[in-house]
Amino acid sequence: MIESFIEGRVRLRSVALSDAKFSERIREELLKINGVRQAEVNPRTGGLLLEYDKASLPLSLLKRAAPLFAEIDALERLPVDERLESLEKLLRDVKGILSAQMTFKH
């Protein structure tokens, strides 16, 4: 669930983020996106704080990815192996949307 969504920062909360392997995978992939400054996961609280450069990733673009971030909650109901496989697809989709900004600049 998206807990807060403001320019420069997105906070997510999900039981799925309590899984260290799952949350680390999300963090690693988010840090690969141009404009992401920081991705901190707290498995104890099931929280993720994503900080980004609003010039590189405008709020309008992040809002397009918001439904995908919201899908993280649905993954918690899956068995672990299916959860990680579904996470990979979800991360590809998020990165595809957020990387689209690069094509708009040229």
Image (spheres, rainbow, N blue to C red):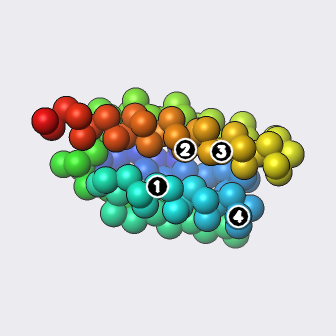
Residue 6 drawn at (x, y percent):
35, 46
The residue drawn where x is 43% and y is 51% is 10
Q: CA distance from mark 4 to mark 3?
A: 11 Å
Q: Secondary structure at mark 1?
A: helix
Q: CA distance from mark 1 to mark 4?
A: 14 Å
Kindly indicate whether the residue at mark 1 contacts the one at mark 2 (C-beta within 8 angstroms): yes
The residue drawn where x is 26% and y is 37% is 101
The residue singled out by tag 1 in the image is 30
Q: CA distance from mark 3 to mark 1?
A: 12 Å
Q: Secondary structure at mark 4?
A: helix
Structural crowding at the residue carrying mark 4, measured as other residues with C-alpha within 10 Å and reported as few (<14), some (14–19) or many (≥20):
few
**87 up-or-down from 17: above or below:** above
- Compare marks 4 and 3 and give the one earlier in the sequence: 4
Q: Amino acid at mark 3?
A: Leu
**17 up-or-down from 38: above or below:** above
Q: Secondary structure at mark 2?
A: helix
| Front in this rendered view, residue 95 or 20 | 95
Q: Amino acid at mark 2?
A: Leu
Q: Which quadrant: the N terminus?
A: top right
Q: Which quadrant: the C terminus?
A: top left
Mark number displayed over residue 87: 3
Quadrant in the rendering for residue 9:
bottom left
The residue singled out by tag 2 in the image is 91
Residue 40 drawn at (x, y percent):
50, 67
The residue singled out by tag 4 in the image is 21
Q: Amino acid at mark 1?
A: Leu
| Front in this rendered view, residue 72 or 26 | 26
Structural crowding at the residue carrying mark 3, measured as other residues with C-alpha within 10 Å and reported as few (<14), some (14–19) or many (≥20):
some
* Left or right: where 29 falls relative to 54: right
Kindly indicate whether the residue at mark 3 contacts the one at mark 2 (C-beta within 8 angstroms): yes
